[in-house]
Image (tube, rainbow, N blue to C red):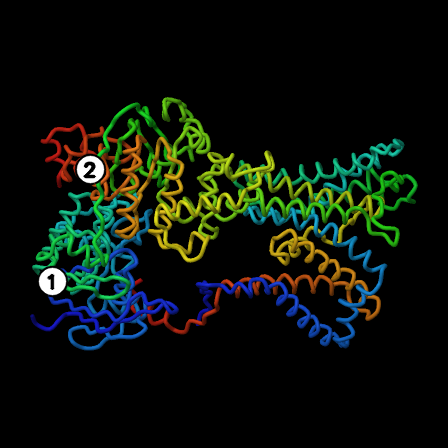
Amino acid sequence: MRIELEKRANPSRLFSILSPFLALGLTVVAGGIMFALLGKSPGAALHGFFIEPLLDVWSLHEIAIKAAPLILIGVGLSVCYRSNNWNIGAEGQFIAGAIAGSIVPVVLHDWHSPLVLPLMLISGMIGGALYAAVPAFLKAHMNTNEILTSLMLVYIAQLFLDWLVRGPWRSPDAYNFPVTRDFAPEAILPELVSSGRANLGFAFAIIAAVGLWFMMRYTLKGFEITVLGQSERAGRFAGFSSRRMIWFSMLLSGALAGLAGVSEVSGTIGKLQPIISPGYGFTAIIVAFLGRLNPLGIIAAGLFLALTYVGGEAVQLTLGVSDKVTRVFQGLLLFFVLSCDTLIQYRVRLAFSRLGRGNEGGAH
Amino acid sequence: MGSPLLAVRSLTKLFGTFAACNGIDLDIQPGEIHALLGENGAGKSTLVKMLFGVLAPTSGEILWKGSSVRIPSPGAARRLGIGMVFQHFSLFEALTVAENIALSLSPGISLSKVAEEASRLSHLYGLPLDPKAHVADLSVGERQRIEIVRALLQNPELIILDEPTSVLTPQEADRLFETLAKLKAEGRSVLYISHRLEEVQRICDRATVLRHGKVTGACDPRRETPASLARMMVGSDVASVSAAGTGARGEVLLEARHLSVSARTPFAVALRNVCLKVRGGEVLAIAGVAGNGQGELFDALSGEYPVADASAVFIRDKAAGNLGITARRLMGAGFVPEERHGHAAVPGLPLSDNLVLARNQSDRRTFLSGGVLGIIRQAVVRIASRRISETMDVRKSGEDPAAGSLSGGNLQKYIVGRELDRQPAVLIVNQPTWGVDAGAASRIRQALVDLAKSGSAVLVISQDLDEIFEVATEIAVISEGRLSDAYPARELTREKIGLLMGGMYGKTEGEEAAHAY
């Protein structure tokens, strides 16, 4: 017996739209089963996970803080993925942006000027873009696989950051803890509203998402991205260059990941430390797909995934489950999103024995 | 007539609700060459796939020598005595002829024995083959012989050939027809699938015509005229193309001077010293068997793959060899590639987007606004798209459907219309009516001729000699990446073109005779 995927002639439009919601529903059900198996009441756990964080101003701010990098990175990745460039290394570009953006507040810590913050943001974007330029160059000119190179560069970035904060950039005032000195007040990203911690990073995310949505929806550049993603040859016929598109999409997503990185250290953490991201760069891949690679959808998806982080922390405290629960939820979600999409495009067919009978002839 | 070798009774194949074959009846007598005629999409391939066990019929019956059979697999078909030569070969290029043949036999037969038997059969049927040659080095005609010998090794009583001459020169086709005559004389039957009326009339004893999955005629092709056969195939009279009014006048608008391109991939063809000139008002047709550098020539002329030497290509007297496709479009050239899906059009995108695809820079002022932002004026594009659809009579479902939802003929009409709508000074078309139904083909050919009449230079690359004679004022032949001189279409015969296809240009008659096997 074999399992075959057969392309559907007319995939249902309705289900294409419903797919992310279907995936959400299935994730919640599977999560409930998981909590039950862990011996917790599924109702209470799911309530704690998904509902309680929405009822509290503090946790709403936390959601905005965590959604900001997810959305920023996710919209950048959506451009990559739509153009058929598989940047998996946003986590590394996030860290590279954080490091580059920290040069001014760490190295030039005596310099006080209103220019500090804009300089940090710009150098963060440049840092992320340069880090993405490595796999871009390798793909455009050496024909390497960007999935592997961008992914491997993540580990290099993580270890480089680790070395920096334990070595040359370690704060003299931190009792030998592996952190840099605290950023000066003018190096801190201002808060969005007075009620809580959410900072300008969230505004950047919304601006980037709306901007890229406009680009994808209305401009020739967006059209170029779509065409090259669907058919390189047709893109060449249209006069578009797939090599330039590799550079464009990788640098754009790298810059946005870098901006997310510098916003995170400047707005949320206030210094560099060995771990600055709970895997935003990877979670953003889920965000991009859950949002159907549409920048507006990604805003919603980013908020939802941020909820899983905040909710995960909440149930960790209230129910005493492992912090891995968040990861499990995110994994389930990606699994269900991809499966729903696949089953909408294809139908599963079990093929019995036909192959066997054909083989018995021994002819082909 | 005696009892048929193979009979098919109300055979039906449904794909979803679409009936690819709908209640087909067909009889094949022993020792006859039976033609299966029909346009693209008429259901010919589906029918033979059911006969060869590749597809399972939805309903209906297949009778082999009078008794009902089920053919669940190609292996079962072979055991009954049915052999098939597919249109697309399944050969391993890196293996030898004998190895490729051995792969289709049951294991345990030694390679030398296979080689021996293959060369015996190939001589018996006039299909010269070297069993030790590597497939990669062989011409398409020779590759087809491997497939035929492979089928003959099974000693079949019925051989199915799917569009066998579409890849052959006229001379190679003649050789194939001799082989078929031999098979027939031995009492074997042949089911011969084609849409070429001339050769069907020449070699077939009976013909069954399919249209939209149904049998629309069974006849003796020799008693019919090409027009009456075409009517059965198409269902209506096909407008003939009128080439009157074309002819060179004015300037040379497109020129290639000693254009050479090395092969981009191991299986590509290098272009060698190609020279051509097309004047306004002229249709230069480039004939040739598939895979002799047509695609490479199109790529170099369109600028999708520019060459280093600027003076290798001139468009309206300006050197363009090193310019990309966009720059060449801005010089007044338009292009129609061979492959519709994923080259000329993105199947998943609507027609209006596919208009922007080809004209995003040439019509920048009309289609885009917002300066550097490049905002696509979708309303304007849709109006232009509607205009093209109306001019070219593109039949579609809905206002702006995805390109992939159109039939081949309608999409091709749109793709050609997209360029004609610009009134290009130079139009380069590769295989303008490949896989297109006869009605659409005639419409497209007339449009190409009309463009030339209005003073543009038109270059048509085609494998279809009927098409070439319909539209061309001048004909050149491409063979192994070399282009022959261009001759006035009136002065050329099919035989002469055939010799040029074999790479015989500039040689004496004696050498030509020596080359014949």
Label 1 resides on the chain identified as B
Position above or below: A295 against A121: below
B352 relative position to A301: left or right: left
Front of the two marks 1 and 2: 1
Residue appearing at x 20%, y 62% in the figure: B154
User: Dividing the picture into quarters, in which one does residue A361 lie?
Assistant: bottom left
Q: Nearer the viewer, residue A55 or A162?
A: A55
Please name the residue that numbered disc 2 is placed on. B502
User: What count of labels does the image hold?
Assistant: 2
Cα–Cα gap, marks 1 and 2: 31 Å
Where residue B284 appears, as percent x and y from the top left, is 26, 33
**Mark 1 and mark 2, same subunit?**
yes
Question: Which mark is drawn over residue A141?
Answer: none
In the rendered image, which quarter contains the N terminus of chain A?
bottom left
Q: Is residue A135 visible?
A: yes
User: Dividing the picture into quarters, in which one does residue A92 lie?
Assistant: top right
Q: Is residue A151 visible?
A: no
Where residue A143 appears, as percent x and y from the top left, is 52, 40
- SS type, badge 2: loop
Where residue B208 appears, as percent x and y from the top left, is 18, 63
B49 relative position to B358: left or right: left
Position above or below: A40 against B304: below
- SS type, badge 1: loop
Please name the residue that numbered disc 1 is placed on. B32
Local crowd size for mark 2, using a 10 Å CA cut-off: few (<14), some (14–19), many (≥20):
many
B396 relative position to A114: left or right: left
Label 2 resides on the chain identified as B
Position above or below: B44 against B292: below
